[in-house]
Image (spheres, rainbow, N blue to C red):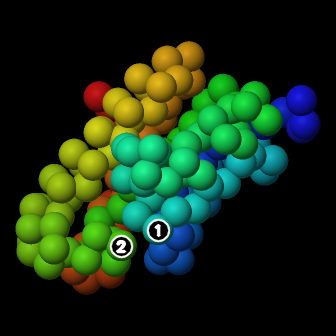
Amino acid sequence: MAGKMEWAVVRCMDGRINPHVNDSVLKYGIPVEHDLISLSGGCGELINPDSRPSTDLSNVSLTLHGTERVLMIQHTDCGAYGGRAACGGTEEADRMFHLNEIQNSMLAVHQRHPALKITAILIHILDNGAATIEEVTL
């Protein structure tokens, strides 16, 4: 096995969330050496990996690096989904859409990799540019 990585972080590539991702990595005690998986649309890409197999965690993190834990991050006002307008049009509708999306992603990953310990957060980008972070459970 190549280098062991206890953690993988799955996130959207949107740079607006970088400070919140960095804060979360520190909050959860994720080591500097972790797998970072940045995808357009974030965790939503994990729901159906058959359409894009390179997004399945097992390709690198689980198989090659022996990853045991994953931090899954989803955010609102995501351009890959068409922004807030395409996800209900309001802050709360967008939040609920992405909350559902990350829960579906968590379930899909758990079904494929039941031993993987999953932590998930939703970064809710507000209309004024500020953001809140909430932990997500199934």
Image coordinates for residue 137, horizontal then vertical, percent: 32, 31
Q: Is residue 82 visible?
A: yes
Query: Residue tagged by mark 2?
Result: 80
Q: Is residue 124 left or right of residue 32?
A: left
Q: Is residue 7 visible?
A: no
Mark 1 burial class by Cα count in 10 Å: few <14, some 14-19, many 20+: some
At x 54%, y 48%, the residue is 53
Asked if residue 110 is positioned above or below residue 101 in the image, the reply reads above
Image coordinates for residue 132, horizontal then vertical, percent: 33, 60
At x 12%, y 62%, the residue is 92
Q: Is residue 121 left or right of residue 15?
A: left
Screen quadrant of the N terminus? top right
Instruction: Please identify the quarter of the rendering in which residue 6 is found.
Output: top right
Q: Is residue 6 left or right of residue 95?
A: right
Mark 2 burial class by Cα count in 10 Å: few <14, some 14-19, many 20+: some
At x 45%, y 44%, the residue is 50
Instruction: Please identify the quarter of the rendering in which residue 63 is found.
Output: top right
Query: What is the C-alpha distance between the residues marked 1 and 2?
Result: 6 Å
Q: Which mark is residue 40?
A: 1
The residue furthest front is 51
Q: Nearer the viewer, residue 39 or 31?
A: 39
Screen quadrant of the C terminus? top left
Q: Is residue 107 left or right of residue 46?
A: left
Tell me, yes or no, whether the two marked residues, 1 and 2, touch with CB atoms within 8 Å. Answer: yes
Instruction: Compare marks 1 and 2 and give the one earlier in the sequence.
Output: 1
At x 72%, y 42%, the residue is 60
Count of numbered circles in the view: 2
Asked if residue 7 is positioned above or below residue 35 in the image, the reply reads above
Image coordinates for residue 46, horizontal then vertical, percent: 44, 46
Image coordinates for residue 121, horizontal then vertical, percent: 40, 47
